[in-house]
């Protein structure tokens, strides 16, 4: 049996979608494309023409592509998965965006702390981290690399732990995914092998963690079934 450390490793756990990540993400996450367009709208409001963005969980390259096509911002993307970063790199080359993007294989702690960013995104990342201090450390590490008054855009799998309430929402999520074209076998495999070990937390706990990490003015900008998005400002 695969241990928990490797369960959420995109390079080692081949049941996680890498080659067709973009397709699966669009099928599995309700309003997936809207997330990035909404974040982009906020970024356009808040950032100057020349800005420096930190993209956490950049593997796959969706944020880098969406933001890069619509701006002249410099971007640093960090992701622990070599395969996912390779996919991001190919996408950037095809869009002629490579010169404005630095890719780092690793975690936020591997991003030089001397570099300061005007904004950061963490989209569908933190729910893989256990709430044993790892989530808080993750947010503090992002906070440390942001300039004062800079925003973090966080989107995460998030739910109450009440079984009845969770099962009702999760049942709708499965129906949505299957209707979107995800094979039933894949859904059942993820439900059996991945979900029981996914260390997601409640919305209340997420805002507590953001506050503890030094963020304030927390605003929820997105919610679809089990996925929730917040904007938070570095105090």
Image (cartoon, grey):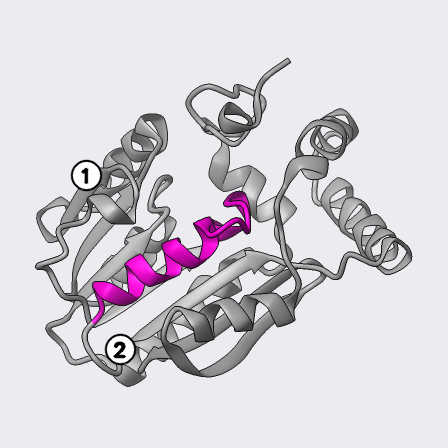
Give the CA distance from mark 2 to mark 1.
29 Å
In the drawing, does residue 44 fall left or right of residue 195? left
Where is residue 174 shown, x and y percent of the image?
78, 44
Which residue corresponds to mark 2?
A: 150
Assign a secondary structure to mark 1. Answer: helix
* 148 versus 81 height, above or below: below
Q: Residue 195: x and y, percent?
A: 69, 38
Quarter holding the N terminus is top right
Q: Position of residue 131 (x, y in %)?
A: 55, 51
Is residue 140 covered in magenta? yes
Q: Give the range drawn in magenta.
A: 125-146
Q: Residue 186, percent across and down?
A: 70, 28
Name the residue: 49% across, 64% down: 35
Look at mark 1 in the image and give the residue it sits on: 93
Q: Do the residues labelled 2 and 1 touch (CB within 8 Å)?
A: no
- As drawn, 152 above or below 156: below
Q: Is residue 110 above or below residue 215?
A: above
Quadrant occupied by the C terminus: bottom left
Rate crowding at label 2 as few (under 14), some (14 to 19) or many (20 or more) other CA atoms within 10 Å: many
**Quadrant location of residue 50?**
bottom left
Q: What element carries label 2?
A: loop
Neighbor class of circle 1 (other Cα within 10 Å; few <14, some 14-19, many 20+) is: few
Residue at 57 percent of width and 27 percent of height? 4
């Amino acid at each position: 049996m695969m241990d928990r450390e490797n369960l959420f490793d995109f390079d080692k756990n081949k049941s996680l979608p890498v080659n067709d990540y973009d397709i699966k993400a669009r099928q599995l996450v309700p309003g997936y494309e809207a997330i990035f367009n909404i974040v982009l709208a906020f970024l356009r409001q808040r950032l100057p023409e020349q800005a420096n963005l930190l993209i956490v969980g950049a593997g796959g390259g969706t944020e880098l592509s969406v933001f890069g096509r619509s701006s002249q911002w410099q971007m640093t993307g960090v992701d622990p998965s070599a395969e996912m970063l390779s996919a991001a790199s190919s996408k950037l080359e095809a869009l002629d965006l490579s010169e404005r993007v630095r890719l780092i294989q690793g975690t936020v702690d591997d991003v030089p702390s001397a570099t300061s960013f005007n904004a950061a995104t963490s989209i569908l990342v933190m729910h893989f981290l256990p709430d044993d201090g790892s989530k808080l450390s993750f947010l503090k590490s992002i906070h440390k690399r942001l300039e004062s008054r800079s925003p973090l855009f966080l989107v995460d799998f998030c739910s109450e732990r009440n079984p009845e309430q969770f099962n009702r929402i999760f049942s709708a999520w499965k129906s949505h995914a299957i209707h979107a074209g995800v094979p039933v076998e894949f859904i059942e495999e993820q439900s059996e092998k991945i979900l029981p070990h996914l260390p997601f937390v409640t919305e209340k706990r997420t805002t507590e963690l953001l506050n503890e990490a030094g963020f304030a003015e927390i605003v929820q900008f997105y919610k679809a079934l089990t996925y929730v998005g917040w904007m938070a400002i570095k105090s």
